[in-house]
Image (cartoon, helix red, strand yellow):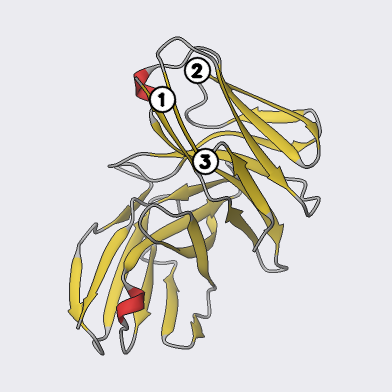
Amino acid sequence: DAGITQSPRHKVTETGTPVTLRCHQTENHRYMYWYRQDPGHGLRLIHYSYGVKDTDKGEVSDGYSVSRSKTEDFLLTLESATSSQTSVYFCAISVSSGRSDEQFFGPGTRLTVL
Amino acid sequence: RKEVEQDPGPFNVPEGATVAFNCTYSNSASQSFFWYRQDCRKEPKLLMSVYSSGNEDGRFTAQLNRASQYISLLIRDSKLSDSATYLCVVYTSNTGKLIFGQGTTLQVKP
């Protein structure tokens, strides 16, 4: 258990509304990530953070923004949700095992945009 | 061509069978390799890292072939509880990102 929680776990919203997903970790890891998972695609990186206020874009960042004001929290915001953002969103942290950096995932948030 | 490719399956095998999955990757600069397991509607969980020398964890054996750019996962004596989707994951330092395959689905039947 990597001590990662996500909230909400499920959300249904309407097109055009803002949505914020929260990822919380309890073990002070520096690196945090947001992914989305869709049928026919592997997990795809949206944004990641390498420290407080330090974030960068992933491969599918359009339509998403992130913030990290505290080590333990990484927020993902959909400024104006669209149906194409219906997905399962996973947060992850990175842990160095000595031979490689391994990522561990939170339980996920299922988002439906109507 | 996708950066990480897996046969999606499904692989349907009886209990006790040995099953192997392969995964190919396109970036020769890739450095680290992993197998994750994902149960239906759950998060991916790290099954094992894959090292150049190959590694084994109980019934699971992972191997890396850098020359041919593929990774394999062998599961011996399959259990019903092994039914899941297995994700091949590759890390490349020049991008600093993990790239996930779409996964291979295994269904172990009594």
**Among the two numbered marks 1 and 2 on one chain, the one whose residue lies closer to the N terminus:** 2
The local secondary structure at tag 2 comes to loop
The local secondary structure at tag 1 comes to helix
Rounded to the nearest angstrom, the CA distance separating label 3 from label 1 is 15 Å
Say which amino acid is labelled 3.
Arg
Provide residue B11's location: percent of width, then percent of height.
Answer: 20, 69
Q: Nearer the viewer, mark 1 or mark 2?
A: 1
> In the rendered image, which residue does mark 1 sit on?
A85
Say which amino acid is labelled 2.
Gly
- In which quadrant of the rendered view does residue A66 lie? top right
- In which quadrant of the rendered view does residue B31 lie? bottom right
> In the rendered image, which residue does mark 3 sit on?
A9
Q: Is residue A75 above or below residue B87?
A: above
Q: Residues within 10 Å of mark 3 (few under 14, many from 20)?
A: some
Q: Nearer the viewer, mark 3 or mark 1?
A: 3
**Among the two numbered marks 3 and 2 on one chain, the one whose residue lies closer to the N terminus:** 3
Q: Nearer the viewer, mark 3 or mark 2?
A: 3
| Disc 1 and disc 2 in contact, CB within 8 angstroms | yes
Provide residue B67's location: percent of width, then percent of height.
Answer: 40, 67
Q: Residues within 10 Å of mark 1 (few under 14, many from 20)?
A: some
Say which amino acid is labelled 1.
Gln
Rounded to the nearest angstrom, the CA distance separating label 1 from label 2 is 9 Å
> In the rendered image, which residue does mark 2 sit on?
A63
Q: At 77% from the left edge and 42% from the top edge, which residue is drawn?
A: A72
Chain bearing tag 2 is A
Q: Is residue B66 above or below residue B27?
A: below
Chain bearing tag 3 is A
Pick the quarter of the image with the C terminus of chain B. Answer: bottom left
Rounded to the nearest angstrom, the CA distance separating label 3 from label 2 is 20 Å
